[in-house]
Amino acid sequence: MLTTPVSTPIVQFEAVSKTYQIGLVTVPVLREVSFAIHAGEYVSIMGPSGCGKSTLLNLLGCLDRPSTGRYCLGGEDVSQLDDDALSTTRGTRLGFVFQSYNLIQQLTVVENIEVPLYYQGLPEHESRARSCRLAERVGLGHRLEHKPFELSGGQQQRVAIARALVNDPLIILADEPTGNLDSTSGAEILGLFDELHQQGKTLILVTHDPTVSRHARRTIRLHDGQVESDVRH
Amino acid sequence: MSATSSIAAGPASALPFTHLSRAVRLGFKNLSSHRLRSLLTVLGIVFGVCSVIAMLAIGEGASFEAQEQIKNLGSQNIILRSVKPPEEQKVSDKGSQSYVLEYGLTYPDLQRIQSTIPGVTVLVPERTLSEYVWNISRRVDCEIQATVPWYPAMRNQHVVRGRFFSDEEMAGSANVCVLGAEMVPVLFPLESPLGRDVRGGGDYYRVIGIMAPQGRRTAAEASGKGAAYRMFIPLETAKTRYGEILMKRRSGSFEAERIQLHEVTVKVAGPEQVLPVADAIKELMRHNHLKLDYEIIVPLEMLRQAERTKQIFNVVLGSIAAISLLVGGIGIMNIMLASVTERTREIGIRRALGARRRDIVTQFLVESVILSAAGGLLGVALGVTIPWLVTRFAEMRTIVTFWSPMVAFSISALVGIIFGIYPAFRAARMDPVEALRHE
Ligand SMILES: Nc1ncnc2c1ncn2[C@@H]1O[C@H](COP(=O)(O)OP(=O)(O)OP(=O)(O)O)[C@@H](O)[C@H]1O
Ligand SMILES: [Mg+2]
């Protein structure tokens, strides 16, 4: 209902820091990172290797908690939630697309797509119907009963995108989604993301490929755990 | 927590049962992708459960059979039996000369027991003679038992056709006999033996009845006499026909034994009197026999002994069961730990997609319970089949009690829970980020 940029942001980072303790040494990976992302934005996060992109994405995805600072997702502070609540948040509000697809090998295409719904306790027939619809939408309606190892990399990544969409999330998070793909399949995946953006989905993707980041409408550059630049284009 | 309640609107809790059934199906799917491994994992439980049920069934059968035999001897009976004393055995083994051995129970013993010990109601004396018994040209190597008319009632044996001999026939030393059912088809394959004569030694006996066959392993074997063919005649008749000396042919010599009675069964008035009367008889016999040429069997004591033996057997069996289920459980735990490590990535994916810790615990626990329950089921099936085969081919009695498969199965399922808990918690404790990064 609130889609104009002036509304409450969907993601709000307020001075978020993340440090890792290695033995006696405290390693700061993110330092007081602040930004806001509104519904319908298509954001790419760039930066040199080791600058903390994946760490940032893990925080955005509620897989990890910030060491200090505040993270509001959809207007709700999630930085202090317990493990169960974080799990439920991931299951209901977030969609993940990984570089290495991360499909479950012993499950078929539809079964993989419906995993998030399984943990929401949705009745089976309902979740099956929804998964089939999404498989159609990413162009895999004819591969429903195949196992991941029977699919090409591009097809596997499309299954992963369908899985990320199945719970109708607030944001879709992608970490180098085209990193393992050849340019043709990579372009297909980016085309799919463009389509999702046009339908009003909020996308955040991590990459160090400038051609990939050109698809996005906004680029946040990280350097050494800090926001170096934040530009819309 | 109030801020989070809208987010944490618990999913599965509304439909716990359907959720569990889906978890079970998922478990089967995961396990069936490693069929051989699952089967091998489960073997420990299978053999544990199977061997316990089978051994229990065989033990139960054997003990039932032993108790049955002892009951056949009569739990209110005390049995005295003539035994060749050990020192005489030595003499007769050495000597090539001929001896007349005199030993065993005597008529005066009988008299003394009857008249001096209170609580004794009936006495059944028996003499046993080995003899060929003929019907014209058919012959049977037979054990002739010379006894009293009330023998069948006292020893739980029945006459199936005709009758047992009467007091008058006993008193008149009549030449009558009752055949054991086993020898009837051999001596009289075509016609009914009732009213016909058989020859034993130099005398003819009229057949007046047929005794019921002895069970496969019954009193005869329990009392140490494996007589397949038996014939009963009155004790008085035997006295007049055979006297008291029995001749035995041995290599190069004759051996003669003088035995008055082979066996005496003493019946007492009530079960509580069995042990005191037995003690009194032991005392009496010790006074009157210089040699240990008799033995005293108290079936009630044997029954108690058998019960004790069974208890010990059950304790031993219980320990074996515990150990084998422990080993089986460790096998399951081992494979579940390996599986958790192997599927770290999957755990990470599931956690990222919304699985809570308890969902992961459920998933792995369900798998280990499926393993152990399947093992238990297989073990029960095998454990019930083996006693059946034993009964069928080894002709041993076995009893599968109703509760033994139940208990064995429940315990094996419990083993799955106990030994699945640690691996399941280990899986659930993993950090999602680390798990996702795992290769
Ligand atoms: N669990 C951890 N313990 C200690 N240090 C960590 C941990 N995770 C990440 N780091 C450190 O944090 C820094 C940032 O890591 P991160 O994975 O976010 O980099 P990245 O920007 O994603 O790099 P790349 O482009 O290579 O994927 C690295 O220096 C890394 O060593
Ligand atoms: Mg990275």
Image (spheres, rainbow, N blue to C red):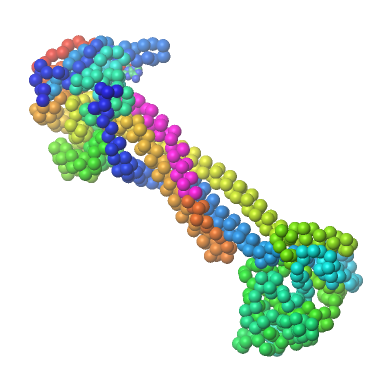
**Which residue corresponds to the image point at 22% horizontal and 18% vertical from the top-left?**
A72
Q: Quadrant of residue B142 in the image?
A: bottom right
Viewed as shown, does residue B233 lie left or right of A82?
Answer: right
Front residue of A8/B423: it is A8
Displayed quadrant of residue B167: bottom right
Q: Is residue A92 visible?
A: yes
Residue B215, percent across and down? Answer: 62, 70
Q: Residue A149 occupies which quadrant of the picture?
A: top left
Residue B219's place in the image compared with A34, above or below, is below
Looking at the rendering, the stretch of residues picked out in magenta corresponds to B407-435
User: Residue at the location (17% across, 21% down)?
Assistant: A10
The answer to whether residue B417 is magenta is yes
Where in the figure is residue B428, as x and y percent of width and height? 37, 30
Identified at 21% across, 25% down, the residue is: A173
Relative depth, front residue between A91 and B64: B64
Q: Is residue A216 visible?
A: no
* Secondary structure mostly seen in the magenta stretch: helix
Relative horizontal placement of residue B323, taking residue B90 as reference (left or right): left
How far across and how far down the image is residue B258, in percent?
86, 73
**Which quarter of the image is occupied by the N terminus of chain A?**
top left
Is A15 part of what is drawn in magenta?
no
- Horizontal relation, residue B15 to residue B417: left or right: left
Q: Position of residue B421 (x, y in %)?
A: 43, 35
